Amino acid sequence: MIINVLGINGSPRIGNSQYLLDHALESASEVDQGNVKIDTYAMKGKTMNPCIACSHCVKHHGDCVHDDDFAGLNDLWLKSDVILYSVPVYHMSIPGQLKCFIDRLGNSMFGRFKSEMPENMDTLPKQLKVVGTIVQGIHLFSGQEHTITDLINHALIMQCIPVTGDLWESYIGAGGWTSNRIERNSLEELVKKGDMDSEAAVRAARAVGKRSVEMSLIIQSGILANKKLLGNDRLYKPLLDRLKDKG
C-alpha cells in the first residue's frame, strides 16, 4: 500500500526545522521502503495571506479569493495520508505563514466538501490523515509544548489523527531547543558535538516520522476492510474516494 507523506517546514528559513524534518522523513521512508512517497514543502519565500472571512471559498468549492501560494500547498495537503509539520516556536505558537495557511485550509474545506455532506449539516468530512508534529525553539522553556498542542488541535479540528513518537523523548510530539543559539544549523552542529538534548530531539523526530506512517497503514487497512460499512456515512465519502485505488 502506498502511503503519501507530506513534510511541511513551517519556518521562514531553511535551517533547524528542516534538519529535524529531514530526519523524520528519512525514518518515515524506511517503514515500508518503496511504498512511502515523500513530498516536501517549505514556507520560505512563500506568500500566505490571512483569511479575510469573505466566504468566497464556501461559495466556490473551496477556491480562495487570494492569489498566492495557498492553492499549491492545499492540493498537496489534500492528497496526503500523513502530514508532518516541523516548525520553530514563534510567540509560543506557530509562525504566521503557517497559521494563515491553516486558517484558510479549514474554511476552504467547508466549501470544497459542502455538497458531499448531509443536507443542512455544516461539518467537515472524516479525513483521518495522520498528523505528526516537530517543534524546536531557541530556549529550553520557550513554548515547544504549547506549539505542539496548537498543531494537535488543528489536526483534531480537521478530522485527522494526531500521533506522537516514543517515550521518553516524545510525549505529545517531538520537541527540541538550540541551547540559546540562533544559527540556522545550530542543531546539526550540536548533534555533531554529541549534545544529549539535540540527539534526543533527532530521535524524537525520527520516531514521529516512523510512528506516523505505521499508524497510517493501520488506519487505512481498517478503513479498506470496512469500506462497505463506512460507505453508508457521507462523512467518509471523500476519504473513501482518496483511498479507492488502494484496495
Image: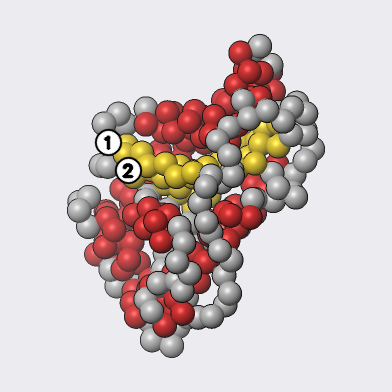
Indicate the position of residue 223 as horizontal and vertical percent values. 32, 55
Secondary-structure class at tag 2: strand
Q: Which residue is drawn at 74% across and 49% down?
A: 92
Mark 2 burial class by Cα count in 10 Å: few <14, some 14-19, many 20+:
many
| Circle 1: residue type | Asn
Query: Does the rendering let one see residue 28?
Result: yes
Query: Along the polypeptide, which appears first: circle 2 or circle 1?
Result: 2
Towards the viewer: 3 or 6: 6
The quarter of the picture where residue 128 lies is bottom left
Indicate the position of residue 153 as horizontal and vertical percent values. 60, 57
Q: Which residue is drawn at 58% across and 74% down?
A: 52
Secondary-structure class at tag 1: loop
Callouts 2 and 1 close, C-beta under 8 Å = yes
Q: Residue 160 carries which label?
A: none
The quarter of the picture where residue 140 lies is top right
Mark 1 burial class by Cα count in 10 Å: few <14, some 14-19, many 20+:
few
Query: Does the rendering let one see residue 127?
Result: no
Residue bearing mark 2: 3
Question: Eyeballing the image, is 176 above or below 100?
Answer: above
Q: Is residue 138 left or right of residue 155?
A: right
Question: Most extreme residue toward the bottom, as rendered?
Answer: 120
Indicate the position of residue 26 as horizontal and vertical percent values. 42, 28
Towards the viewer: 105 or 215: 105
Residue bearing mark 1: 35
Indicate the position of residue 7 as horizontal and vertical percent values. 45, 42
Q: In this view, does 202 lie to the left or right of 180?
A: left
Towards the viewer: 237 or 140: 140
Q: Is residue 216 left or right of residue 150?
A: left
How far, Cα to Cα, is label 2 from label 1? Answer: 6 Å
